[in-house]
Image (cartoon, coloured by chain):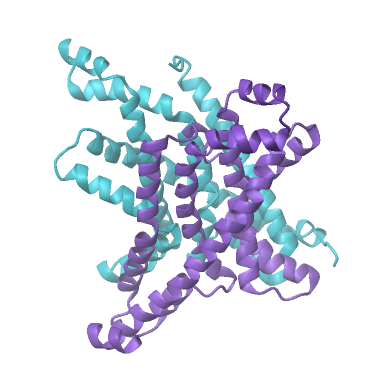
Amino acid sequence: MKEIFVSVFGKPFGIVLFQLLEATQFTIYLSLFAFFGGGAIGIVIALLRIYPSQKSRIGAVAYIWLFQSVPLLMLLFLFGLGIPRLFGQNVDPWIAAIGALTLYTSAYLADVWRGSIETVPKGQWEGARALGFGFFKTLQLVIAPQAIRNTLAPTVGFMVQIIKGTSLAFIIGFHDLMSVGKRWANAPVNGTEPFVIFPLMALIYFCLCFPLSAFSKQLERKFGSVSKQDLPTAV
Amino acid sequence: MELRFFEIYRSPEYLLLLAEGILTSAVLTISAGTIGFVLATLLASARHHSWPVLGQLSATFIEFIRNTPLIVQLFFVAFGLPLLLGYQWAFWAHALLALIINFSAYFAEIMRSGFLSVPIGQLEAAKTLGVPSFIAFWKILLPQAIATMYPSLSSQFIFLFLTTGVIAEIGVRDLTFAGLFIDSRSFRSFEVFFTLTILYIMMALSFKGILRLVFIKKFSWWSAP
């Protein structure tokens, strides 16, 4: 694979391009972990948020507020440097990066899904209750099928935020597109100047993100979206 | 495991660094937000009025910036451009330029929907009354677009503020930089970044309050349709 790149693009540039693209896979893996991990926690938090119990609701509101207000960079520092030092234990950059991005993702997705569930009229809950359905039965059979449509666009749109967020993980020693690109930009090799490498990296990130943004916009046109004013509700 | 917050707050040197960092972060974010907003208005109106070439250019710019990470833009502005064009600025100036570029794209996307939300009939009426198009833009279109989009603009501003910590990576002495410095001296990483998190949240809350006050003062005429 590397030889093909070298023969097509020449000596330094072929190697650089190959290494950047090879490192991009870790950016993608990290994004997927964060998305599915954050999604799983997000569902639980969204359910706690709408569950008819004061305690669970307050807990979920606090969780969402907290992790939407904490800067992602601080989450990464706390997971990658703070917690290892506090417990005198080494933490793998993979674990730290996944942990930080998962919490970051979960708060946002929980808020989107909560917002969407709340757009379903109250009468639907009451109707299902009158028919003798419990909380989860109602959610599964009545509410979720109606609520899911307008969560699609913001959920896909948030994947762009996650991919862009992974670019910060190099700060705690995670090996990805960002860290490889930065190393090349610092290397005193002709043809890998910062004004070549960074636009190239931007282009790779753009190729990952733009299809998702475009898809999200298409979904929004087709299925609508949770009210824009409720979204990025940091703080 | 032992928490030693006092190592931070008992040292006047660290407290001074943190205060300096808060000030730098706040000044840079507010400047970038203000200049970025002006630029965003131009970008959005180029798109809204579909000016030839400029309209497409601003659409491309907005999409490209919104779909790439801030840190890559920052490194390009701080290390790539100076080498390419042969100039040398202070760290903070590079950071400010990168933040303006970044903020303007996000604000422009919001302002575009703001312009679309103003009923076309109002501008047609202004035209019929012989109001010059610039005055119509300045007095009719822009104020209503900002007022409609104010909640989105202010939450986007706060969202962007929370990402500005990356400018420490190019050596700007902002709040994150102060944290990293104290961490390298004291090795109390958890306490340092916990403190930083609290400070960031408090700053974000203050921004939110200030933005709210500005809205009450400047947009008291506005009633949501």
- Residue B144 x %, y %: 37, 22
Which residue sits at x=55%, y=28%? Answer: B212
Which residue sits at x=32%, y=69%? Answer: A200
A138, above or below A172, in the image: above
The colour with which the image depicts chain A is purple
Question: In the drawing, does residue A30 fall left or right of residue B116?
Answer: right
Question: In the drawing, does residue B170 fall left or right of residue A4?
Answer: right
Between residue B175 and residue A182, name the one nearer to us: A182
- The chain drawn in cyan is B
Q: Can residue A74 be seen in this view?
A: no
Figure label count: 0
- Residue A135 x %, y %: 72, 34
Question: In the drawing, does residue A167 fall left or right of residue B139?
Answer: right
User: Which quadrant does the N terminus of chain A fall into?
Assistant: bottom left
Q: Which residue lies furthest to the front in this view?
A: A131
- Residue B118 x %, y %: 32, 22
Question: In the drawing, does residue A220 fall left or right of residue A111?
Answer: left
Q: Can residue B41 be seen in this view?
A: yes
B166, above or below A69, in the image: below
B203, above or below A201, in the image: above
- Residue A233 x %, y %: 56, 39
Q: Which quadrant holds residue A96?
A: bottom right
User: Which quadrant does the C terminus of chain A fall into?
Assistant: top right
